[in-house]
């Protein structure tokens, strides 16, 4: 969307379930409204969050330096800065791509990266940051149009898979789904026990768009069933999902399938937090919308 509403992706309002409460027996999970997709932690941004009335924020890939991992002190300072503004740092979403690209592709050096990712997770836990959102998309998020306008002239994005079906093979070559699944299993086997030990919840974002492949690279988290399989790889309260409702809606032909997915993962306490988004259509062709005008009834 345009202006501030686009900059902070308020169409992606985050509804955070305090999944971390499962580490404290007897406490009831609650839902909290937060602001997500904050890249630069500026005073103006923190003030904007307070003006909106939210109590939590999620910071997206903060620039904290480090040699392939995040040190404890910068993470602690990040949390303290957020709390100093009267807000709660609910999660950090995504580590830098170069922290784990060799892991995703199964390249030499992946074990060194794994060790450093585990150090990051330990430092997150010790700095009091309870959730780490991540993805396993080597080619990241794709859209084919960013120029259409929606309600009130707001900028929206669209995806049409027909336009990318003949895209050239990526510079990394072909990576089939089974190779990527094996790499994800290797990754989770190493990091989930560390996260559980440190009281950190790992929240996996689905592939967006949820199509079979783009430019020869498979996209493996593209269905509700794929999400279920990931939860079974390493059963743990720390192995959870970032429920991007927009992406799940892109996967599903009907809104009822989205509601069913929410019930399935919600009753199992697998939803760490939610990207509260809406869309029209589904793969292979969809467009983003304001939350009150897409195919999913957000009050449902």
Image (spheres, rainbow, N blue to C red):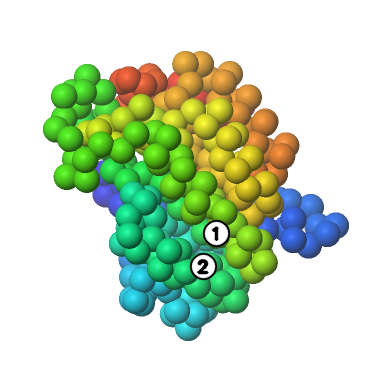
For residue 15, side relative to residue 109 (left or right) = right
Q: Residue at x 39, y 39 (%)?
A: 179
Between 204 and 244, the residue placed more toward the observer is 204
Question: Could you give the CA–CA distance between mark 2 and mark 1, rounded to whole angstroms?
Answer: 8 Å
User: Would residue 76 appear left or right of 102 to someone viewing this image?
Assistant: right
Q: Nearer the viewer, mark 2 or mark 1?
A: 1
Expressed as whole percent of the image width and height from the top left, the position of residue 288 reads: 34, 31
Asked if residue 263 lies left or right of residue 148, the reply is right
Tally the numbered discs.
Answer: 2
**Residue under label 1:** 190
Badge 1 element? helix
Q: Are marks 2 and 1 in contact (CB under 8 Å)?
A: yes
Label ID, residue 118: 2
The percent position of residue 1, horizontal first and vertical second, equals 30, 41
For the question of whether residue 167 can be seen, the reply is yes
- Establish if 115 lies above or below 181: below
Vertical order, 199 against 177 (above or below): below
């Amino acid at each position: 969307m345009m202006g501030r509403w686009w900059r902070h992706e308020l169409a992606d309002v985050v509804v955070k379930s305090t999944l971390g409460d499962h580490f404290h027996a007897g406490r009831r999970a609650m839902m909290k409204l937060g602001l997500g997709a904050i890249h630069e932690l500026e005073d103006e941004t923190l003030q904007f969050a307070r003006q909106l009335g939210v109590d939590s924020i999620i910071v997206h890939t903060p620039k904290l330096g480090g040699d392939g991992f995040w040190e404890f002190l910068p993470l602690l300072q990040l949390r303290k800065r957020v709390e100093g503004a009267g807000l709660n740092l609910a999660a950090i979403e995504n580590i830098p791509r170069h922290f784990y690209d060799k892991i995703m592709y199964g390249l030499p050096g992946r074990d060194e990266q794994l060790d450093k990712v585990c150090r990051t997770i330990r430092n997150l836990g010790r700095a009091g940051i309870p959730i780490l959102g991540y993805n396993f998309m080597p080619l990241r998020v794709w859209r084919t149009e960013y120029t259409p306008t929606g309600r009130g002239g707001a900028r929206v994005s669209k995806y049409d898979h027909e336009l990318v079906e003949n895209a050239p093979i990526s510079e990394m070559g072909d990576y089939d789904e089974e190779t990527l699944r094996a790499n994800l299993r290797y990754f989770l086997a190493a990091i989930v026990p560390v996260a559980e030990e440190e009281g950190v919840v790992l929240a996996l974002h689905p592939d967006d768009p949820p199509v079979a492949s783009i430019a020869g690279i498979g996209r493996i988290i593209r269905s509700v069933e794929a999400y279920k399989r990931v939860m079974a790889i390493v059963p743990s309260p720390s192995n959870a999902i970032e429920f991007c409702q927009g992406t799940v809606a892109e996967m599903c032909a009907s809104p009822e399938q989205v509601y069913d997915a929410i019930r399935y993962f919600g009753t199992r306490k697998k939803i760490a937090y939610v990207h509260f988004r809406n869309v029209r259509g589904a793969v292979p062709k969809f467009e983003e919308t304001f939350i009150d005008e897409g195919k999913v009834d957000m009050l449902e």
